[in-house]
Amino acid sequence: MFNLTPLVRNLIIVNVVVFLLQNLMPVGSDRCIEFQYSPGLTGLISLWPIGSCAFAPYQFFTYMFAHGGFGHIFFNMLALASFAPILEHYWGEKKFLTFYVITGMGAGILYAVVNYFMGTGGGSMLGASGAIYGILMAFGMVFPNLEIMLLFPPIPLKAKYMVFVMGFLTYAMDRSGSVAHLAHFGGALVAFVLISIWRSQGR
């Protein structure tokens, strides 16, 4: 645990730097009042509803490097440091980076498209959770019988069951209803499809 590989270390650094910049650059022009647009860097790089005045296509990439608070970034980076290094060792830097970006963007696209067609609108979405749940799904598929010691509760669990347990715990502990569970599901779904494609290609 925490034997950080080069790419995972760099991803953590980028996320932390962006988080610090979010807090240092909170001021900007409020140009989208109807969606309670957050001005400054956070408002620019978060993922806003498709068709809203705050939406920009680049946000499908940038949203996964922004976070809403210390607890948000802490637990995402804890999961990244815990499960991603072994995948980077196994796949190599290039393939792992490809996987991380595809699952993160895929989660954002699925979230935005479903909300667009359902007409739910709403505010912004941000955080690395889509890519993180992609990593959890990948870990469970690549190392299904590897036992992981959970922290909450502290019991051993095979990796192939871990993603479902963590998904349930995240849902159960969401008292405010502010967690984008669809993005979590999207990241896991994209990871499942991507790894299945790689396996069918003998990769």
Image: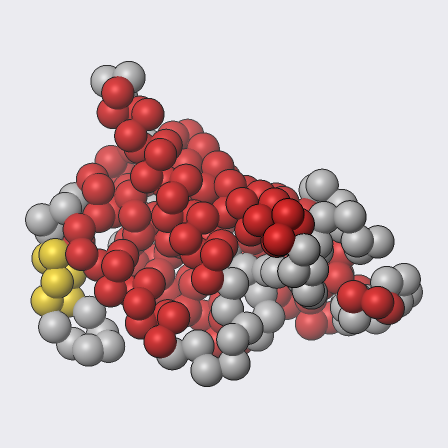
Q: Is residue 97 visible?
A: no
* Residue at screen point 66% across, 50% down: 116
Residue at the outermost bottom position: 175
* Left or right: 82 in relation to 49: left
Q: Confirm whether residue 153 shows in the render.
A: yes
In the picture as drawn, the residue positioned furthest to the top comes out as: 201
Figure label count: 0
Q: Vertical placement of 55 versus 72: above or below?
A: above
Colouring used for the render:
secondary structure
Q: Name the image quarter holding the N terminus.
A: bottom left
User: 156 left or right of 91?
Assistant: left
**Residue 103: percent from left, percent from top:** 45, 42
**Can you tell which quarter of the image residue 143 is in?**
top left
Q: Nearer the viewer, residue 15 or 136?
A: 136
Residue 189 position (above or below residue 151): above
In the rendered image, which quarter is residue 16 located in? bottom right
Residue drawn 37% across and 48% down? 188
- Quadrant where the C terminus sits is top left
- Please say if 151 is above or below 198: below
Q: Position of residue 93 (x, y in %)?
A: 38, 34
Compared across the picture, whether 201 is left or right of 41 comes to left
